[in-house]
Image: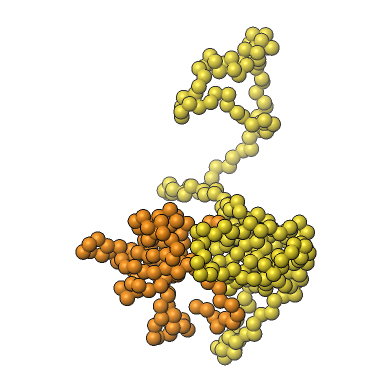
Amino acid sequence: MAPRKTPVVSRNPQLIRGVGKYSRSKMYHKRGLWAIKAKNGGVFPKHDPKPKAAATPVKPSKFYPADDIKMPLPNKRKAKPTKLRASITPGTVLILLAGRFMGKRVVFLKQLTSGLLLVTGPFKVNGVPLRRVNQAYVIGTSTKVDISGTNVDKFDDKYFAKAAEKKNKKGEGEFFEADKEEKSELPQDKKDDQKAVDAALLKSIEAVPDLKSYLAARFSLKAGMKPHELVF
Amino acid sequence: MVKGRQGERVRLYVRGTVLGYKRSKSNQYPSTSLIQIEGVNTKEEVTWYQGKRLAYVYKAKVKTNGSHYRCIWGKVSRPHGNSGVVRAKFKSNLPPKSMGDKVRVFMYPSNI
């Protein structure tokens, strides 16, 4: 059948499961079956069945298993990214609550397909690079930054995957020496990506008075501050 | 714990005190501890803290994982009474010497 252009909507609202509001005769009238009949001379229109495509000959199977094995039902579920809180929109300033950068105020860029939030300092302002962060470890403030100048399409979870480690399956002697590898340097293209994203961001940040020093400062609870009463 | 960090230390947790175990007059049930969170005085205020993680931090003579500090993690589960005291369950029960000690109530998992 060709796909329908309008979705199928029932004209008979459900009162409870299994019970519709209208009776059969009322539904006959509602669906306009009387009009279809009248248009076709008092009879329902008949369509000739479409010619069936010639069935390809099915070869008999060479092997039948001795017992019927139960196959598990296929799992067709797809995971969706976690629902973003209403307070977090692209350009929101977030406060990181845990981890290396706890207390830092950071700009939210977008939500990745894994559900994690892509975030940047900007690096020049507070030392936070392009980073992924979990929504649960973040407070969304009401401060927004304009991020229309930035292009974050190229960042996804694969960008942040660890570089595959070289396999050191050599002899024992070399194993002990190879243990002390130098710290891997950040590849230059990641540094360039950071600069590209931050350049546009810095312009919109400097346009707002005090926002740069706000982002550079860290959040901390002080004496007498009650988080359940604070408005962020 | 803190990896020899220079620079400002930020407090991103609320201080709390361990009051004791959940108990009746003559029996106590150590699987649940009672925590008094600073600044929380009614059970309506406790709803913000429900589900937040707690850490009981203590020191020991022997270094484990390179540090003298050790920690027991837990969660705020529900209010206890009307005046802001909170019930908490920890990964392993709090030791009795923790009564009267400080506990850290973090602001995550956050919902704001």
Rendered view: A48 above or below B18: above
- Side of B23 where A41 appears, left or right: right
For the point 41% across and 59% down, which residue is it?
B41
For the point 71% across and 65% down, which residue is it?
A211
Quadrant where the image shows the C terminus of chain A? bottom right
Where residue A101 sits: x, y (%)?
A: 60, 71
For the point 64% across and 82% down, which residue is it?
A183
- Side of A77 where A55 appears, left or right: right
- Side of A212 where B9 appears, left or right: left
- Side of B30 where A210 appears, left or right: right
Rendered view: B71 above or below A171: above
Rendered view: A103 above or below B85: below
Where residue B95 sits: x, y (%)?
A: 33, 73
Where residue A179 sits: x, y (%)?
A: 58, 86
Quadrant where the image shows the N terminus of chain A? top right
Q: Residue furthest front?
A: A224
Q: Nearer the viewer, residue A217 or A199?
A: A217
Among the chains pictured, the one given yellow colouring is: A
Q: Nearer the viewer, residue B44 or A105?
A: B44
For the point 53% across and 14% down, which residue is it?
A25
Among the chains pictured, the one given orange colouring is: B
